[in-house]
Image: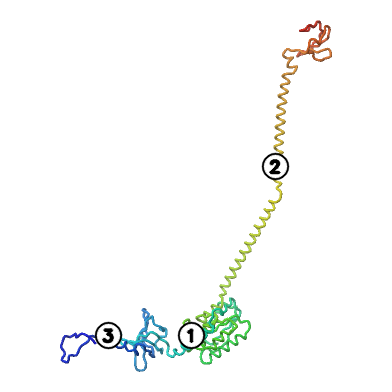
Amino acid sequence: MTGNYDSGQEQSDQQTAYTVSAVADYLKTSLESDPRLADLTVIGEVSGYRNPSSGHHYFALRDEQSVIRCVLFRSGRGGRFLTDGTQVICHGRISIYTARGDLQFYVDHVEPDGVGALQQAYEEMRKRLEAEGLFEQDRKRPLPELPSRIAVITSPTGAVIQDILNVLTRRYPLAEIVLIPTSVQGEKAAPEIVKAFQALNALDNIDVAIVARGGGSLEDLWAFNEEIVARAIFSSNIPIISAIGHETDTTIADWVADRRVPTPSAAAEIIAPDARDLAEYVAGYAARIDEIIGRSVRDSRSQFEMAIDRMNLRVPDTAQPRQRIDDLLTRARLAGQRLVESSKQRLATVEASLNALGPAKILGRGYTITRLADGNAANSAGQFAAGDKLGVMFADGTVETTVDEVDNKSIVVDS
């Protein structure tokens, strides 16, 4: 051991004085170098348990004669088993907390006293049954959505059955509940549970079954770790929900069952739909049906109207030809009217021209028309001879006369 002589006063026997830190460090090193103290298992009763916000666990282990201060850091395992008065088995190492000079047991694992052997048996059972395929997910059956009859395997007394009945009555009163009573703890529990499963499979029309019990220690729950119970669940003809213990408890029955839930109440909630949710679902489904029917009617009507439109397209269009004929008749009538008017105008023009060129107009300008004795108009002097009767037409009348003399150029008449 090394250290400093603090007083500076010479000792007659030359004894070396050490600092407190040096002594504490020496004790710490000595304790931690002892292999028996570096890998130590201690059984005792928990007292003075504290769990501050740091997450570490501070407590003491005691028996009838002695006490050892202990600490389990938050990274350690088994802190949930630490409560005052609990008998536990702790594993860790002995050292010195040099800040206070306290001898301290630094624990890294805690388990309840008596659990070690059971835990080992549990692990061995779990591995063996897993290797046989009892835990395979492919063999697990789906739960019915709307069960009519629900069996419950549990103790007929206690809070478990009441919790399940309360939930089922509130959520799904339509289902019939069949209680198959059994012990759930003790030496006789496992055989009774197997008989309960035999009774379950003998019943008719059971849709699903719940096997349940409340929480407890590993010893309390051990019946549900028995191999005969595991095989009874595996051989069940009916889907099984396992609700054993609390959420942190896991039994062999949980591994084999078709569904594992943390509490009995949770099992009832999973298997039983809420009647109010069902009512809302039915209402929503009815609304969807109405919408589908309405949409179908609208689609059918639209298709029918489209079919009528296609038929109308294939039928000859008589409206347009009728209108075309009416237009042509109107145009023909207008053209006839214009033709008549135009003919009248041309006729008036011709009539005016004829009138302008007619004998009356010519006679009016001083010309005369000489007629032969037979009444025809004469157009040559050679048509007459002396003594011939002739008529001379004026514009205002006719003069009868006799030809006195005819020469080559003119006729001399006796007026």
Of the two numbered discs 2 and 1 on the same chain, state the one appearing first in sequence.
1
Q: Secondary structure at mark 3?
A: helix
Asked if residue 415 shows in the view, the reply is no
Q: Give how far across and how far down residue 215 sits, in percent.
A: 48, 85
Q: Cα distance, mark 2 to mark 3?
A: 123 Å
Residue position for label 1: 215
Residue position for label 3: 25
Q: Give how far across and how far down residue 254 sits, in percent.
A: 52, 83
Q: Could you say which is closer to the camera, residue 311 or residue 172?
A: 311
Image quarter of the N terminus: bottom left
Q: As displayed, is residue 77 above or below residue 326?
A: below
Dot in front, 2 or 3: 3
Q: Cα distance, mark 3 to mark 1?
A: 46 Å
Q: Is residue 119 found left or right of 276 in the rendered image?
A: left
Q: Residue at x 62, y 61 (%)?
A: 295
Of the two numbered discs 2 and 3 on the same chain, state the one appearing first in sequence.
3
Of the two numbered discs 3 and 1 on the same chain, state the one appearing first in sequence.
3
Residue position for label 2: 324
Q: Residue at x 52, y 80 (%)?
A: 260
What amino acid type should be assigned to the residue bearing mark 1?
Answer: Gly
Q: Could you say which is closer to the camera, residue 410 or residue 174?
A: 410
Dot in front, 3 or 1: 3
